[in-house]
Amino acid sequence: MYWILGDESTVDETFSTLEQNLVKEYLKNGGQLFVSGSEIAWDLDYKGGASDKSFFLNYLRADYKLDDAGSHQVTGADGGIFDGLPFEFDDGSGGIYEEDYPDVIDPKMSAVACLKYSTGTTAGIQYEGLFPEGTASGKLVYIGFPWETITDDMQKKIMLQKISEWFGCVEPEITSIPDKPFLSRGYPNPFNDLVNFQLLLPNAVDFNVRVYNSLGQKVRTIAYPMTMKNKYQLSWDGTNDYGQKVASGCYFFQVALERRVLTEKIVFLK
């Protein structure tokens, strides 16, 4: 079951009593639930009554921490279903809608973090096991921001693919590899220490990585071993070819393939 709540909050009632009861029965019988929304924790755990708080803890397996994460960039937590994958959601410039209050949550009741905001706080949790009075093991993925606000369509598909694979709805395979080369946006961005990217290739091919300043001058060439892979984690630490930190400003991270060049704009702040 995929439950996409967007910005629904206290006024809209994220989970009514009827909906809570339906979700309880579904999960108790081994159901698999993906739920996303920016105000679920606020509505149920912070503003809700005793029954709302109980539902949130026992069935969504989380604890409300903050109403605003202060970040629109997340990456998969180590060992989770999104391990190392970057996602970025709309801060008002992505053309979807501005997500102004993404919830910060903590995993509870044997759940674990599967997504982290760039600030280090938890953006999503996953859980596998029995729910209260359960008769079969169920699964849950819950993220504290709206899935639909992820700004890159490929990243949206990758997230759903990873969830579906974990749920067993599809065979685990590299369907997240696109039919053309894909370079994620840098995260975090702006950065002052290390910026990260994910490169996905339909075929294992040679590539070059270079960083250019706003004048088009090359400041860094980054070497990566060719290991015949389809997925690469790329990064830049803000230094030039001489190991010196570059000046604050806009830069362009470029991956040059044989017939295609992929470029992402990034901002370095000292």
Image (cartoon, rainbow, N blue to C red):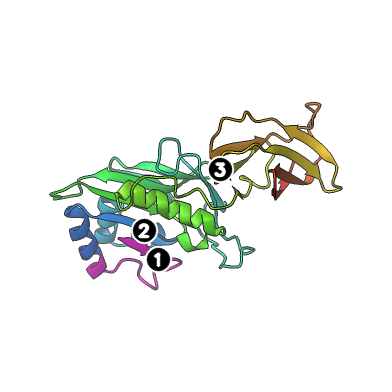
Could you tell me what secondary structure mostly forms the magenta stretch? loop
C-beta proximity under 8 Å, tags 1 and 3 = no
Q: Please name whichever residue, 143 or 103, is drawn nearer the observer in this view of the structure.
A: 143
- Please identify, in this view, whether the residue under mark 1 or under mark 3 is nearer the observer: 3
252 inside magenta stretch = no
Label 1: element kind:
loop
Label 2: element kind:
strand
Cα distance between the residues tagged 2 and 3: 33 Å
**Residue receiving disc 1:** 5
User: Within 10 angstroms of label 1, few (less than 14), some, or many (20 or more) residues?
Assistant: many
Q: Residue furthest bottom?
A: 11
In the rendered structure, the answer to whether residue 34 lies left or right of residue 101 reads left
Whole-percent x, y for residue 192 in the image: 69, 39
**Residue receiving disc 2:** 35
**As shown in the figure, which amino acid type bears the numbered disc 1?**
Leu
Whole-percent x, y for residue 60 in the image: 31, 53
- What residue span does the magenta drawing correspond to? 1-19
Measuring 83% from the left and 48% from the top, which residue is drawn there? Answer: 214
Q: How many labels does the image show?
A: 3
Judge whether residue 67 can be spotted in this image: no
Whole-percent x, y for residue 213 in the image: 81, 44
Cα distance between the residues tagged 1 and 3: 37 Å
Residue 70 vs 112, above or below: the answer is below
- Please identify, in this view, whether the residue under mark 2 or under mark 3 is nearer the observer: 3
Q: Name the N-terminal-most of marks 2 and 1.
A: 1
**Residue receiving disc 3:** 203
Residue 53 vs 79, above or below: the answer is below
Label 3: element kind:
loop
Give me the disc on residue 75. Answer: none
In the rendered structure, the answer to whether residue 41 lies left or right of residue 133 reads right
C-beta proximity under 8 Å, tags 2 and 1 = yes
Residue 96 lies in quadrant: bottom right
